[in-house]
Structures are given as C-alpha cells and as structure tokens.
C-alpha cells in the first residue's frame, strides 16, 4: 500500500523503491515480521508503504500504513526534547542549571554527590555518568515508589554513555513543572501513549508480563513507571512524518528550539538527537545537517534540514523476541543510503 501527494514525485519514486526493496527483502528472509517505510520531501512529496505482518504470534495480521507502532526511544525526541526546550525558551527552566533546580529532592540525603550537579543540558545530550541500563521495574510495583527509588538511589558512576536514566529524570522534571503525570499530558498531534491492539504492531512476548505486547508499551521501566520521559509514545508513519515536517518548517522559520536540536553537544549527539558519525544509523551519505534517532522496538527517524527531507523506518523487529538477529542495524543504514540518492 502506498500513498503520494499531488505534485511531482518522479525523483522520489526510484530511491523510494530501492529503499523499500531492502525492507521487503529483510522481511522476506524472515528476520523481521513487518515494517513501514515513509519519506517526506519538501520538493518531491511524500511516499509511504507497508509490507509483512503486524503480528504473527498470537494471530496473523497484515501490516498497513495505518498501523500504530510503539516508537520506543523516538519518544525522547518527539515528546520529551521539544517540551524541555520549550520550557527553557519560556524561562521555566535553565538548561545549564542542575536538575535539582526543578527536582530539589534528587539525592537529597547526599548534598555533595555528583548526581546533584547534573544539568538538563547534560541529560539531553547523554553527557552524564549514569549507567546505560538499569532494570528499575524489578525494584517494585508502585510507580511513585519507583520514582522515589530513581531519585534517591546512589547511582554507579561511569563514563558518559547513552542512558535512559537521563530521560527518566527529564520526564520527572516535566511532571513536576506541569503538575501532572506524563500520561496525563497531551501526547502530541497524531501520537498517543497506547494504541488499539487490533491496529498496533505487536512487539515482544514479554517474560515479565507473560504475554505478547500489542498496543501497550514494550519498555519495562516505562510500563512500571506508568509513563516516563524515555519511551512510551505510539504513532503511525504519517504521525512521525508530520512531526518531522513540522520541525523542517520551524527550522526554515528560524525557530531557536529546532536550532538547538541541531546544535552539537558531542561528536555523536546534539540536544536530544544523534548526528552523523562513522557507522551511524542514518547511513554513510548523510550531510552534517542530518539528525536522527532510533527506537529499540525497531523504529527510526532521520531529518535532513539542508535537503528538506525526512524518512522513517518503522518495524516490529522485536516480535516475538528481542533475542534474535534481526539485521536492523545494517538495514537502517542501507535504507538511509538509498534515500540519500534522491536528487
């Protein structure tokens, strides 16, 4: 199934077909159950197409362009980052202030600890010493008690790595400022914090919950916290592309928040997003204006500001298990290279 807007799309069609063929081959080999590819180009229009199955274990359902996906860590850049930057623009938080300026009780029993010096900007760019992974969901069942655990735990210190803890803290800061839980906030145009099971791509057979997940968040920590800043957003291919198109429009208008999303904080990261480096998910043909982010469930979004283009690859590569070689890392890069042959 494919859809194209009115207008000239000939220059888009051949690269789209090449990129889609890569996804189709991956699904044909049995490595990934199903997926949707979408490209939005300001000059050439939009194309989307689906292939494979939205669910194969617990019932066979065909993937469509209207299928909802658990976007996983795309939630960071589609939900948390824009809201944190907007609050900073409004003067409601200072990106260079410590997180304790909004969460004063963070590690409150150790006033001189390193955690209390961590800033919002450092969390946005994953420039903190927090560990990469922590199974927070194993420490209890009450979401408020788990928030207290996150805030009072003595975190082991290491080199800066990509860590969900950064965005769990940013999510708690959003909740403190807005006075409501994340799931009580507006998810954003076209997005939601859950999806109808019959319209959603299935993810994993979760050993913790004892069932195939479909329309409920895959990430265990986000599920246990009942909403968090690092995961939990659901959307369709058009919702993701509409979000990207909005950022392209805002950038063209000189929006300062989008400019921060493009501003490097390290050799691999900006304020929230990744930027091109050797071996990154967007492929080898990206220019320096491209930002992108991936999600553990098999999702990804990349935006090329110089060329006025965005593309998203949405798959259910963890269905029915994450413990398999889906080939998603090579697939993302190859798709990006095919997309970047558009004139």
Image: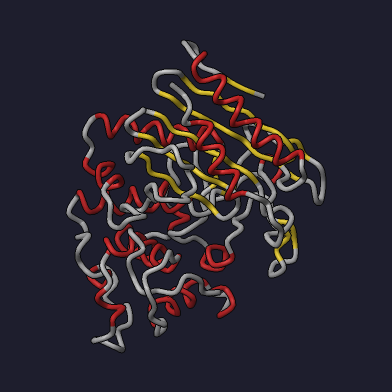
Choose top left, top right, bottom left or bottom right for residue 130. bottom left
**Residue at image location 46% in from the left, 31% down from the top:** 340
Residue furthest left in the image: 91
Depth check: give the residue in front, 222 or 131: 131
Query: Which x, y percent locates residue 56?
Result: 79, 46
Query: Which x, y percent locates residue 190?
Result: 49, 37
Left or right of 92 on screen, residue 165: right
Depth check: give the residue in front, 250 or 226: 250
Residue furthest top in the image: 7
Residue furthest bottom in the image: 109
Q: How many marks?
A: 0
Question: What's the colour scheme?
Answer: secondary structure
**Looking at the figure, which quarter contains the C terminus?**
top left
Depth check: give the residue in front, 340 or 163: 340
Depth check: give the residue in front, 127 or 118: 127
**Looking at the figure, which quarter contains the N terminus?**
top right
Tell me if residue 28 comes above or below residue 89 in the rendering: above
Left or right of 7 on screen, residue 275: left
Query: Which x, y percent locates residue 157?
Result: 38, 80
Tell me if residue 87 comes above or below residue 335 in the rendering: below
**Residue at image location 59% in from the left, 65% down from the top:** 220
Query: Which x, y percent locates residue 259?
Result: 25, 42
């Amino acid at each position: 199934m494919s859809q194209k807007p009115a207008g000239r799309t000939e220059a888009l069609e051949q690269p789209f077909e090449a990129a889609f063929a890569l996804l189709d081959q991956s699904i044909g080999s049995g490595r990934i159950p199903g997926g949707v590819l979408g490209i939005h180009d300001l000059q050439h229009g939009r194309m989307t197409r689906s292939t494979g199955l939205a669910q194969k274990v617990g019932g066979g359902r065909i993937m469509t362009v209207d299928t909802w996906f658990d976007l996983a860590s795309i939630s960071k850049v589609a939900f948390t980052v824009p809201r944190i930057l907007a609050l900073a623009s409004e003067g409601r938080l200072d990106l260079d202030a410590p997180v304790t300026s909004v969460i004063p009780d963070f590690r409150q029993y150790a006033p001189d600890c390193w955690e209390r010096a961590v800033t919002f900007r450092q969390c946005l760019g994953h420039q903190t010493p927090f560990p990469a992974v922590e199974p927070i969901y194993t420490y209890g069942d009450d979401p408020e008690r788990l928030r207290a655990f996150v805030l009072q735990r003595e975190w082991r210190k290491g080199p800066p790595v990509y860590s969900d803890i950064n965005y769990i803290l940013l999510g708690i800061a959003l909740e403190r400022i807005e006075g409501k839980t994340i799931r009580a906030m507006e998810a954003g145009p076209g997005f939601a914090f859950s999806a109808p099971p019959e319209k959603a791509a299935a993810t994993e057979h979760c050993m913790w919950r004892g069932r195939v997940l479909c329309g409920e968040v895959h990430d265990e920590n986000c599920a246990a916290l009942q909403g968090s800043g690092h995961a939990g957003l659901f959307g369709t291919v058009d919702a993701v592309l509409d979000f990207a198109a909005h950022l392209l429009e805002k950038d063209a208008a000189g929006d300062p928040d989008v400019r921060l999303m493009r501003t490097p904080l390290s050799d691999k990261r900006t304020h929230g997003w990744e930027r091109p480096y050797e071996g990154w998910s967007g492929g080898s043909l990206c220019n320096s204006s491209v930002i992108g982010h991936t999600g553990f469930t098999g999702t990804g979004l990349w935006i090329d500001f110089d060329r006025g283009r965005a593309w998203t690859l949405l798959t259910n590569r963890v269905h029915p298990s994450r413990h398999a070689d889906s080939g998603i890392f090579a697939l993302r890069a190859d798709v990006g290279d095919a997309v970047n042959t558009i004139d």
